Image (cartoon, grey):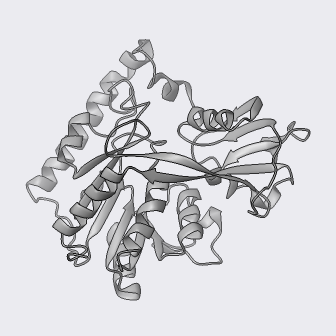
Amino acid sequence: MSYIESSWYKKRSTITWLLAPLSGLFFLLSSFRKLLFKLRVIKSFKVEIPIIVVGNISIGGNGKTPFVLWLVPHLESKGLKVGVISRGYGAKAPVYPYELTSTSTVEEAGDEPFLIYNRLQCPLVIGADREASYRILKEKYKVDVIVSDDGMQHYKMPRAIEFCIVDSKRRFGNGFLIPAGPLRELPSRIKSVDLAIENGGDSLFSYQLSSSGFYRVENKEFAEDSPNEGIAVSAIGSPQRFEKSLEVLGKKLVDRKHFRDHHAYTEQDFSGTESQAVFMTEKDAVKCQQFAKNNWYYLKVDATPTKELIVKIDQLLKQKGITHGI
């Protein structure tokens, strides 16, 4: 995490006020763009298949991916055929839109889409042009509903439901828009979404991240036993949350290595760690499997929603005509 990014979650400082004019400019430009959509100067593309957006108003580390990993099977349990679209941040696909397959690499797909596809095995397409991705899912797979991993600010894409994920601990940081703060939109945007969902915390509409155990990075096999101490390595938005989870599970961390979110790992990133076990997230692990050592482990986590959240989601699905009373 850079110096500027770390300032977002601290008391407002000199760097905050120095960057504030740029945040003001960002606000004016984004507000003007939203006005163009409101006045229909720029129009959203038309859809016949409902799109559910799982997004946020801040940059990274809010816990969208675990919620998507829960939501897709939940929709499938209601008899719906589900597809997923994503921007594919950090991906280097040979062509866009890019449809993930069993031969796709994490470099081509990006870490989060690659993780989602390998966990769920559902149709998944990445690319900046959401309309082109939508058409592939509609024409090739004839899906009943599409889940958009991120995309709240992509106003060209219509949506039937908006879920906004909020980190219960970091919330909205210092309250500033980027680059002085972490926000893409003002907190008032929450009022316009169908449901704000907290990652952690004690809100009625929240979910907890529960551990499913440690797995070996090199082969993704469940580790019956894992060392009691080692190094935590992560390239995620909120490394402290991950490290706290490790400590709660009884792991003693002798060192911590942080990289920027979506960092493309190389073997050199792990120089000097040979004598220690390495603990990482599943998102990190998918980028390290090719050169992983036999004492590298990842912690698998799953989202566990409250009963109230599940009931509310099912109500929304019915209200929007997605489940047709199922």
Q: Is residue 49 left or right of residue 140?
A: left
The image position of residue 146, as x and y in percent, is: 35, 71
Q: Is residue 88 left or right of residue 82?
A: right
Quadrant of the frame with the N terminus: top right
Looking at the picture, does residue 24 appear above or below residue 118? above
Residue at the limit of the structure toward the front, as seen here? 307
Looking at the picture, does residue 49 appear above or below residue 287? below
Residue 44 shows in this picture: yes
The image position of residue 320, as x and y in percent, is: 18, 67
Q: Is residue 151 left or right of residue 186?
A: right
Q: Residue at x 74, y 35 (%)?
A: 251
The image position of residue 226, as x and y in percent, is: 81, 47
Q: Residue at x 49, y 26 (%)?
A: 4
Residue at the limit of the structure toward the top, as seen here? 14
Looking at the picture, does residue 174 appear above or below residue 80? above
Residue at the limit of the structure toward the left, as seen here? 39
Q: Residue at x 60, y 66 (%)?
A: 108
Q: Nearer the viewer, residue 278 or 98?
A: 278
Count of all numbered marks drawn on residues in the image = 0
The image position of residue 307, as x and y in percent, is: 35, 53
Residue 159 shows in this picture: no
Q: Nearer the viewer, residue 129 or 48?
A: 48
Quadrant of the frame with the C terminus: bottom left
Q: Nearer the viewer, residue 46 or 208?
A: 208
Q: Nearer the viewer, residue 326 or 19?
A: 326
